[in-house]
Amino acid sequence: MLISMTGFGQGEAANTHSTVTVEVRSVNHRFLDIAFKLPRSLQNREPDIKEIVRGKIARGRVSITIAVESSLSSQGVSINEKVLEQYLTQLRAFAMRHKIDDHITLDALVTLPEVVTTKEIEAGEDEVWPLVERSLSDALDACNRMRVEEGKALETDLIERMRLIDRTVAAIEKLAPAVAKRQVETLRKRVAQLAGDVTVPEDRIAAEIVMLADRTDVTEELTRLRSHLGQFNGALKDGGEVSKRLTYLLQEMHREASTMGSKAADTEIIQHVVVLKEETEKLREQVQNLE
């Protein structure tokens, strides 16, 4: 089974006082990279959250958002008495200097900047952590289910493209012997035309044929391609974390196709080589999304 690195999942857990909602998003990445958006009360739990994620996801950029709603949460109010005293002292001095009646009221004072402050009091870490564990686990499971479905779709596409590559390789294998034969015949005709009435030793012609065959023979490349195809299909069947292995095999397949393109002296074979290179590039893009 192949697993994509693209997924989304959501989980929610609640008790009498609090509700925790977790969203998990994942995209492709070379390694496992985890990012958080957490309430202040859960900042100390980052290592525990990472450990839970590592237990369920092996690779990808994973973004986690955790929201906590609690009936225990409240607004804390505080009065900055030092600031208030400074306001009061200076206002009274100002009123005295300018002979203004002192009618300073508490209502007026509390509206002055930084006299009264409010602070959100959140539910405690111990209160919500069990809910976080449950909702995070559910969100990761949902994300993984989506990653599996995405992986199935990718696998179907990979198999179809591999079948096209297999047919293209078979076409080249069928063409190659005839191409080699035509090249030998062309060489003999050119030698005869250039030599005219001069007799060219047969062993010299044979040596040239051997050199030509060596330069244009694509048998080794086809053999290695077949080997890479077999390994690629085997990896698809095995499943798991295969992205790096498939990427390497496709790189080698592209290399063999490029070598055949430079050696082949036949238009039809070169057209097939172009197809091979195009398909291996498309496959390389696809396998980048696999775990």
Image (cartoon, grey):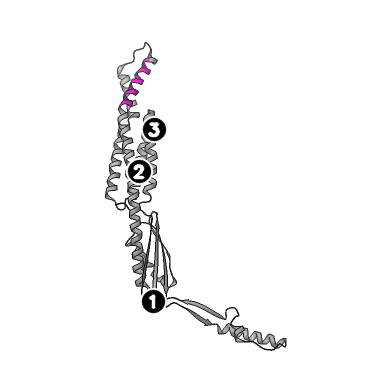
Q: Which percent across, then down, holds residue 216?
A: 35, 29
Image height check: is 74 above or below 277? below
Tell me, yes or no, whether the highlighted magenta stretch contains residue 191. yes
Badge 2 amino acid: Leu
Image height check: is 76 above or below 211? below
Which numbered tag is attached to residue 250? 2
Query: Which quadrant of the view contains residue 137?
Result: bottom left
- Given the current orientation, which residue lies at the most extreme right position? 98
Tell me, yes or no, whether the highlighted magenta stretch contains residue 56. no
Badge 1 amino acid: His
Mark 1 or 2, nearer chain start: 1
Instruction: Pick whichever, 244 or 199, lies toward us.
Output: 244
- Asked if marks 2 and 3 touch (Cβ < 8 Å), the reply is no
Which residue does the numbered mark 3 point to in the structure image? 271
C-alpha separation, residue under disc 2 versus residue under disc 3 = 19 Å
Badge 3 amino acid: Gln
Mark 3 or 1, nearer chain start: 1
Q: Which percent across, then down, holds residue 285?
A: 39, 46
Which numbered tag is attached to residue 17? 1
Please report the bounds of the magenta region as a residue range: 178-192
Nearer the viewer's eye, disc 2 or disc 3?
Answer: 3
Tell me the chief SS of the magenta region.
helix
Instruction: Pick whichever, 169 or 245, lies toward us.
Output: 169
Q: Is residue 102 left or right of residue 27?
A: right
Rate crowding at label 3 as few (under 14), some (14 to 19) or many (20 or more) other CA atoms within 10 Å: few
C-alpha separation, residue under disc 3 versus residue under disc 1 = 69 Å
